[in-house]
Amino acid sequence: MDIAVLGATGTIGRLVADRLEGGGQTVRRLSRSASGVDTATGEGLQGAIAGADVVVDATNIASFRASRAVPFFATSAKNIAAAAKKEGVGRVVCISIAGVTRAGAGKRFGYYRGKSAQERAYRAAPVPTTIVRSTQWFEFASLILPQASVGPIAVLPTMKMAPVAAERAADHIAEEIIATGHGEVPEIRPGQNARLATDDGEDPANRIVAVCGPEVMTTAQLVRKTLAARGDIEDLSPRVVTELPYLGRALAGGVLIPQERNLVVDDLTLDSWLER
């Protein structure tokens, strides 16, 4: 297949593109910085995806503010869907985050409101769409700790999650892209300790899949384990690591833990990942 990956210079976009190429697919690595394709304005978008079989939306914006995240994600999704429709692309695959559409998830975290707006735009899109929702990655510790640390103290937002390694999420996402691009429902390999439900009763043109890890933990537990194994995170090694529910009760209570019927549960634990 010919697959266009938008946002291919970001973490998940790059990993997914690598997996697709490793599986023998033809991949167009597209991004604003590398190829001049701007999904928010639509500049260069239609020509860049012309002739592709599948378009993958792995775009991102480095802002937690709803005033920036919501218009970026919503407008980009509408532009991508419209361009895909005009060019006859068979399917769009959006890489999203588990739980962002559930009540309260984005109340105090604007980035999640943006991802929720992105999903709404795709669910109303004029092309067949697959939304793959990944939980927070193990690498989330490196993102959140610098933002929540002051000197020797880190006060993290309480977020209950079922994290997964980014590279394992990319593996599952790539499998989903290839299978649904061929009009198939992917099967889980034996011994993978994962499960994927069928789509019985769902709209065959549109599909929602979630990917998560095998363990439930909070942000503080993720950070503490990572610090214990590695000594520091982004050159930070706070003496006190605590957490408070300042991003809202919904995130603290577990809305980010996937409940989708189509759920892939990866078998790599945080401890095993940290030992590598």
Image (cartoon, rainbow, N blue to C red):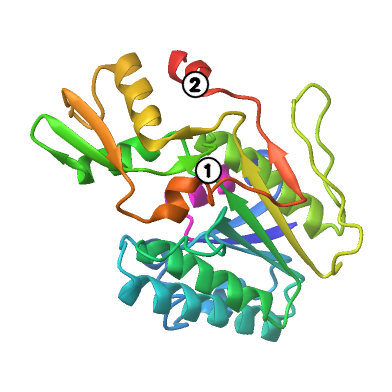
Q: Amino acid at mark 1?
A: Leu
- Is 9 contained in the magenta span? yes
Expressed as whole percent of the image width and height from the top left, the position of residue 221 reads 39, 28
Expressed as whole percent of the image width and height from the top left, the position of residue 136 reads 48, 43
Q: Residue furthest right?
A: 200
**Numbered marks: total:** 2
Numbered tag placed on residue 175 in the rendering = none
Numbered tag placed on residue 15 in the rendering = 1
| Local SS, label 2 | helix
Point out the frontmost of discs 1 and 2. 2
Q: Which numbered disc flags the more N-terminal residue, 1 or 2?
A: 1
Nearest the eye: 39 or 238:
238
Figure check: 31 above or below 38: above
**Secondary structure mostly seen in the magenta stretch:** helix
The residue at 57%/45% (across/down) is 257
The residue at 26%/28% (across/down) is 233
Which of the 4 quarters of the picture holds residue 21? top right
Q: Is residue 89 visible?
A: yes
Q: CA distance from mark 1 to mark 2?
A: 17 Å
Whether the residues at callouts 1 and 2 have beta carbons within 8 Å, the answer is no
**Residue highlighted by disc 2:** 273
